[in-house]
């Protein structure tokens, strides 16, 4: 029997650009982990911190046997 597990793909949406810089940034096991991920992500940046509106969170299903 296959089991489905939700996972969450974090995509940089390039909201302030022309869309050409969209990219997958992370895969999270829980959507609630986004805040902690964003804090860690920004701690590694030399540039201005990014905000949550610059990312889309897409729920996907992972199927396992």
Image (tube, rainbow, N blue to C red):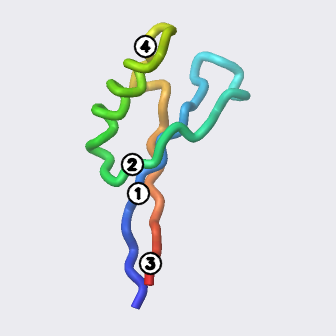
Residue 13 falls in image quadrant: top right
User: What's the residue at 51%, 9% (across, down)?
Assistant: 47
Q: Could you tell me which secondary element the residue under label 2 belongs to?
A: strand
Indicate which disc residue 55 carries: none
Disc 4 crowd, CA 10 A, few/some/many (<14, 14-19, 20+): few
Q: Tell me the residue that label 2 is attached to.
A: 28
Q: Could you tell me which secondary element the residue under label 3 belongs to?
A: strand
Disc nearer the start of the sequence (3/1): 1
Mark 3 or 1, closer to the camera: 3
Instruction: Estimate the spatial distance between the alpha carbons at disc 3 and disc 2, rounded to whole Å.
Output: 17 Å
Question: Residue farthest to the bottom?
Answer: 1
Q: Could you tell me which secondary element the residue under label 4 belongs to?
A: loop
Q: Could you tell me which secondary element the residue under label 1 belongs to?
A: strand
Disc nearer the start of the sequence (3/2): 2
Instruction: Estimate the spatial distance between the alpha carbons at disc 4 and disc 2, rounded to whole Å.
Output: 20 Å
User: What's the residue at 46%, 75% (across, down)?
Assistant: 63
Instruction: Estimate the spatial distance between the alpha carbons at disc 4 and disc 1, rounded to whole Å.
Output: 25 Å
Q: Tell me the residue that label 3 is attached to.
A: 64
Q: Tell me the residue that label 1 is attached to.
A: 7
Residue 29 falls in image quadrant: bottom left
Disc nearer the start of the sequence (3/4): 4
Looking at the picture, how far across and down is residue 4, in whole percent? 39, 74
User: What's the residue at 57%, 41% (across, down)?
Assistant: 24
Disc 2 crowd, CA 10 A, few/some/many (<14, 14-19, 20+): some
Disc 3 crowd, CA 10 A, few/some/many (<14, 14-19, 20+): few
- Viewer-nearest residue: 19 or 1: 1
Disc 1 crowd, CA 10 A, few/some/many (<14, 14-19, 20+): some
Q: Quadrant of the C terminus?
A: bottom left
Instruction: Estimate the spatial distance between the alpha carbons at disc 3 and disc 4, rounded to whole Å.
Output: 36 Å
Please say if the residues under marks 1 and 2 sit with CB atoms less than 8 Å apart.
yes
Q: Tell me the residue that label 4 is attached to.
A: 49
């Amino acid at each position: 029997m296959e089991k489905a597990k939700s996972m969450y793909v974090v995509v940089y949406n390039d909201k302030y650009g022309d869309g050409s810089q969209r990219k997958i940034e992370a895969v999270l096991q829980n959507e609630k982990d986004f805040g902690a991920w964003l804090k860690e992500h920004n701690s590694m940046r030399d540039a201005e911190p990014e905000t949550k509106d610059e990312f889309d969170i897409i729920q996907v299903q992972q199927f396992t046997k």
